[in-house]
Image: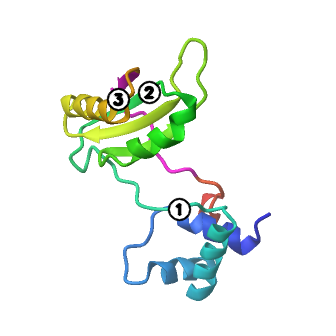
Amino acid sequence: MLTDVEKKVVTAIQGDMPISQRPYRDLAESIGVTESQFIAAVRNLHDKGIIRRFGATIRHQKSGFSANAMVAWKVDEAKVHEIGKVFAGFKGVSHCYRRSPVKTWPYNLYTMIHAQAQEECVEMAREMAQTAGVEDYNLLFSKLELKKTSMEYFASDDDD
């Protein structure tokens, strides 16, 4: 169970980080704790495995990457972890997940590929397949972005 301070810290870091010399100090002040208390709470949440990581969310279209594809891969279950590491090592891959297949959709490993053109996504998937020895995969290109937000686990006081 999270303490009230931990909930406030999670709320503070789930949104945009201040662009300043001391963003953690600014966030700490916004929730009424010191910078060192804020950083200690983040470390504690990380050490307990509650926070795995946090980082920047890039709007890929605004940064020059106009094509992206979710690639669904059919991978031998015994090799999912190994091949997942290989795929995750490709520069254009932002996400790599293992999911359970179903009868009508046999794919169990998924990657998101970002590039400047669809042809580059196709070529990267081909290179990934060749590198890992995976023959069965399917590229699903994004047609329209309907929603892209970060998950909010606790509402801020401003949302009341």
Give the secondary structure at mark 2: strand
Q: Quadrant of the N terminus?
A: bottom right
- x, y percentage for residue 58? 35, 53
Query: Which residue is painted at 40% across and 44% down in the image?
Result: 86
Label 3, label 2: how far apart the Cα atoms are = 13 Å
| Front: mark 2 or 1 | 2
Give the secondary structure at mark 3: loop
Decide which of tag 1 and tag 3 comes sooner along the chain.
1
Residue 11 location, quadrant: bottom right
Query: Which residue is painted at 25% across and 48% down in the image?
Result: 62
Q: Which residue is mark 1?
A: 53
| Front: mark 1 or 3 | 1
Q: Is residue 140 visible?
A: yes
Q: Is residue 55 magenta?
A: no
Give the secondary structure at mark 1: loop
Q: Which residue is mark 2?
A: 72
Which amino acid type corresponds to the residue marked 1 in the rendered image?
Answer: Arg
Relative side of 78 to 134, left or right: right
Mark 3: give few (<14), some (14-19) or many (20+) Cα within 10 Å: few
Q: In the rendered view, would you say 97 is above or below 118? A: below
**Mark 2 in CB contact with mark 1 (< 8 angstroms):** no
Q: Which residue is mark 3?
A: 142
Label 2, label 1: how far apart the Cα atoms are = 25 Å
- Front position in the image: 65 or 110: 110
Report the span colored magenta.
137-151
